[in-house]
Image (cartoon, grey):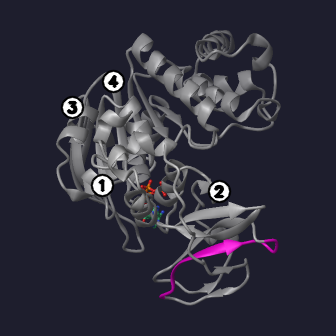
Amino acid sequence: MIRFEHVTKRYPDGTVAVDDLSLEVPRGGITVLVGPSGCGKTTTLRMVNRMVEPTEGRITIDDDDITARPAAELRRSIGYVIQHAGLFPHRTVLANVTTVPRLLGWDRPRARTAAMEAIEKVGLTADQARRYPAQLSGGQQQRVGVARALASGPDLVLMDEPFSAVDPLVRADLQQEVRRLQRDLGITVVLVTHDIDEALTLGDSVAVMRQGGHLAQFATPADLLAEPADDFVASFVGKDRGYRALGFADVRVTPRAERSVQVGEQVRAGSGWVLVTDGSGMPLGWVDGTGWGGPVREDRLHRLGAVAGPDDSARALLDAALSSPSGRGVVMADGRVVGTVTPEDVLDALARRPDADRVGQGGDAS
Ligand SMILES: Nc1ncnc2c1ncn2[C@@H]1O[C@H](COP(=O)(O)OP(=O)(O)OP(=O)(O)O)[C@@H](O)[C@H]1O
């Protein structure tokens, strides 16, 4: 249905976010783009609705080149869900969900009916539809984000880390809900996540990406586990390490000391990724001091990724490391940064455990 033909995206500063991607996303089902932070997942997703334009190559949907239609029109025909729901805070839930149908020129009663149907489909009530986003929980807000994407009845819905800002129990509920909606409505979903477990749980097909915007492997979850294309995929999928078992694995990982700066302080060019905290040691995000130097401003901040506690499971620690743009996951205790961990730190700690063999039984360990 969506075909990427030798697609490359080079940002004006020279960053190659996606490198010569060729990929065919099948119609129907859920296709997941997964990989560590910065590997080009979001850029790939945003090229589908032309929020980002490729530098080279071609993207087609049902054999039509997407550049043949005006970008705004294309965008309205495709559902889009983002991490923090992205709702308008001063509009009610109903008004938020009515947005796209109204932009499509539907009259008010038709748009309202479609919006109420979408709100019900995601499991929210008429009473909740009258509230403002801030009066709902994070998980409910995320449902509103899904309802808004579905209201105009698109065939295709793009989701960018839709569940990563909600707690794990709510996340599992939302995952099931999206799976159910996809089946009931017969739509095509393309979903971005850094969480390999989410990818394996939800994806009918999974594209594993690696740094530099390379596609490492595109396969079903079963094939990824059984026949990873290379060492990168094998370690990312955790074939030999039983990723699913990590949630239960009790490891001690000593965080590495992490230098941090505050907003307004100088970062030297060439210092790599630098953590930014506020005056009390609360982490705010990362700045990329690879090719840039200067005083840290808030608009330079990249997002933090997931944060783990020192006693969290191996899964939570690995999640923090994989979702961090620096590749170093932030570990916090008592509201302050105590250090960072890399994926290798977590995997090494697992390998050193006395019962490491038991965890090393691959996908069967779930
Ligand atoms: N507007 C931009 N200008 C310059 N570089 C960018 C821009 N947007 C993204 N990048 C860079 O392109 C690369 C890929 O970014 P992208 O957001 O697509 O990755 P990702 O895999 O979705 O990561 P994350 O989960 O952290 O968002 C990164 O190195 C990122 O810093």
Toward the viewer: 241 or 139?
A: 241
Label whose residue precedes the other's in the sequence (2 or 4): 4
SS state under label 4:
strand
Q: Is residue 120 left or right of 46 when viewed as pictured?
A: right
Toward the viewer: 190 or 48?
A: 190
Task: Give the residue at x 39% y 66%.
Answer: 11
Q: Pointer 1 and pointer 4: residues touching (CB < 8 Å)?
A: no
**Ligand 1 quadrant?**
bottom left
Q: Which residue is mark 2?
A: 309
Label whose residue precedes the other's in the sequence (1 or 2): 1
The CA span between labels 1 and 3 is: 35 Å
Label 1 crowding class (10 Å Cα cut-off): few <14, some 14-19, many 20+? some
Note whether ligand 1 is within 8 Å of mark 2. no
* Circle number at residue 235: 1
Which amino acid, mark 3? Asp
Q: Which residue is mark 3?
A: 63
Q: Pointer 1 and pointer 3: residues touching (CB < 8 Å)?
A: no
Instruction: Write down the region rendered in magenta.
Output: 270-280
Which-is-in-front pick, marks 3 and 4? 4
